């Protein structure tokens, strides 16, 4: 048991600096018909003007989405789920709209369906896993 606590503490100490410079985005876990769905929310504040310009110019994939769903672009989000001394990371798309100098979560398209079931999630991470989401490529 003591070895597991040392490994868990080491994992937290190693993971914390890696994400220190990454913006955190709100995320939550819901059960829809027994399947887990991760929903993103919130905004990424104080985005540098150069990044906003780059996103406006370079995101050709969002041209159709922008017209139909109000999406200005997409970023990659790393979801980190922890519980029962287990950690799992998943990459997912984060669709955003540019509002002033921030990127806001698009309310229509910001859900992600992971490849595990709710029962697998609870078995591996416990009844109340902790989940944090970080922008991976801003």
Image: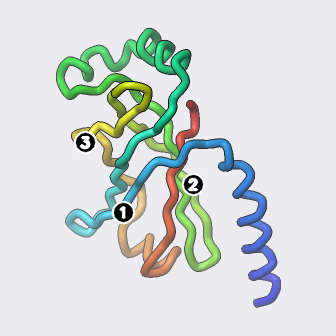
Q: What residue occupies the far left of the structure in this picture?
A: 68
Q: What label sits on residue 9 in the rendered view?
A: none
> Is 53 on the left-hand or right-hand side of 10?
left
Name the residue at 46% across, 48% down. 25
> Is 2 on the left-hand or right-hand side of 64?
right
**Residue bearing the label numbered 1:** 29
Q: Please rate how many residues cluster around mark 3, counting C-alpha atoms within 10 Å: few if below 14, some from 14 to 19, many from 20.
A: some
Q: Position of residue 47 (x, y in %)?
A: 51, 29
Q: Which marked residue is nearer to the observer: mark 1 or mark 2? A: 1
What distance separates the C-alpha of mark 1 from that of mark 3? 15 Å
> Is 118 on the left-hand or right-hand side of 6?
left
Give above or below for 25 relative to 3. Answer: above
Label located before the other in sequence (1 or 2): 1
Q: What label sits on residue 89 in the rendered view?
A: 2
Label 3 SS: loop
What distance separates the C-alpha of mark 3 from that of mark 2? 23 Å
**Residue bearing the label numbered 3:** 107
Label located before the other in sequence (3 or 2): 2
Name the residue at 81% across, 78% down. 6
Q: Which marked residue is nearer to the observer: mark 3 or mark 2? A: 3
Q: Which of 43 and 123 is in front in this view?
A: 43
């Amino acid at each position: 048991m003591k070895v597991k606590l040392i490994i868990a503490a080491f994992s937290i100490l190693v993971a914390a600096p890696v994400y220190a410079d990454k913006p955190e985005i709100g995320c939550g876990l819901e059960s829809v018909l027994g399947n887990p769905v991760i929903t993103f929310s919130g905004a990424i504040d104080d985005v540098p003007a150069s990044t906003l310009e780059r996103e406006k110019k370079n995101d050709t994939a969002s041209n159709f989405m922008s017209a139909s769903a109000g999406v200005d672009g997409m970023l990659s989000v790393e979801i980190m789920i922890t519980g029962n001394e287990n950690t799992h990371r998943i990459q997912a798309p984060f669709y955003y709209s540019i509002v002033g100098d921030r990127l806001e979560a698009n309310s229509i398209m910001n859900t992600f369906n992971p490849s595990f079931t709710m029962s697998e999630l609870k078995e591996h991470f416990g009844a109340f896993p902790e989940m944090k989401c970080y922008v991976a490529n801003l």
